[in-house]
Image (tube, grey):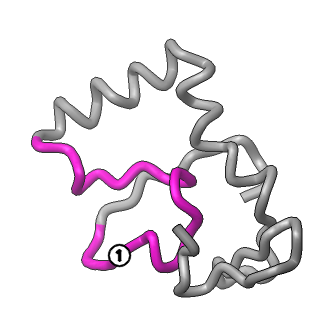
Amino acid sequence: MTLPTVPIVLGHTDYSLVAPHGSYVDASKYRTPMDLANHLKHLIKDEKAYEKHLKWKEEHRLVTSTMKFQSSSNKFLFQGDCGH
């Protein structure tokens, strides 16, 4: 997660419980694969939209390889309580 990449997730879990808001694209939120593709194309063309998915890195950091996140203010460990 140190590279400027945005994971695309699809599964039977609530990713907001294990990752900061906006740090991923949830494919299940798109009505069709084409809608998802259009969103990804938009992110490629619009740098500011893409950077919104990386904003979480300013306030959180990965503290283990098991996807636990800690805020920069060290007030909480992002691990099941999304805080929003």
Q: Which residues are magenta?
A: 11-31
Tell me where residue 65 appears, x and y as whole percent: 73, 80
Q: Is residue 43 above or below residue 5?
A: above
Q: Is residue 28 above or below residue 43?
A: below
Q: Is residue 75 above or below residue 24?
A: below
- Is residue 4 toward the left or the right of residue 35 in the image? right
In this rendered view, identify the residue nearer to me: 75 or 44: 75
- Is residue 48 toward the left or the right of residue 42 in the image? right
Element marked by disc 1: loop
Q: Where's the N terminus, which quadrant?
A: bottom right
Answer few, some or many: residues within 10 Å of disc 1's Cα (few below 14, many 20 plus, some between 14 and 19).
few
Mainly helix, strand or loop, the magenta region? loop
Tell me where residue 76 appears, x and y as whole percent: 75, 82
Count of numbered tags: 1
Q: Is residue 4 above or below residue 83?
A: above
Instruction: Please report the residue visible at 57 percent of the width from the left and 54 percent of the height from the top.
Output: 23
Residue projecting furthest to the right: 73
Instruction: Please report the residue visible at 76 percent of the width from the left and 47 percent of the height from the top.
Output: 3
Check disc 1 and report the residue beneath it. 14
Instruction: Please report the residue visible at 50 percent of the width from the left and 53 percent of the height from the top.
Output: 24
Q: Amino acid at mark 1?
A: Asp
Tell me where residue 64 appears, x and y as whole percent: 77, 83
Instruction: Please report the residue visible at 28 percent of the width from the left and 30 percent of the height from the top.
Output: 37
Tell me where residue 19 appears, x and y as whole percent: 56, 69
Residue projecting furthest to the top: 45
Residue projecting furthest to the left: 31
- Is residue 21 toward the left or the right of residue 57 in the image? left
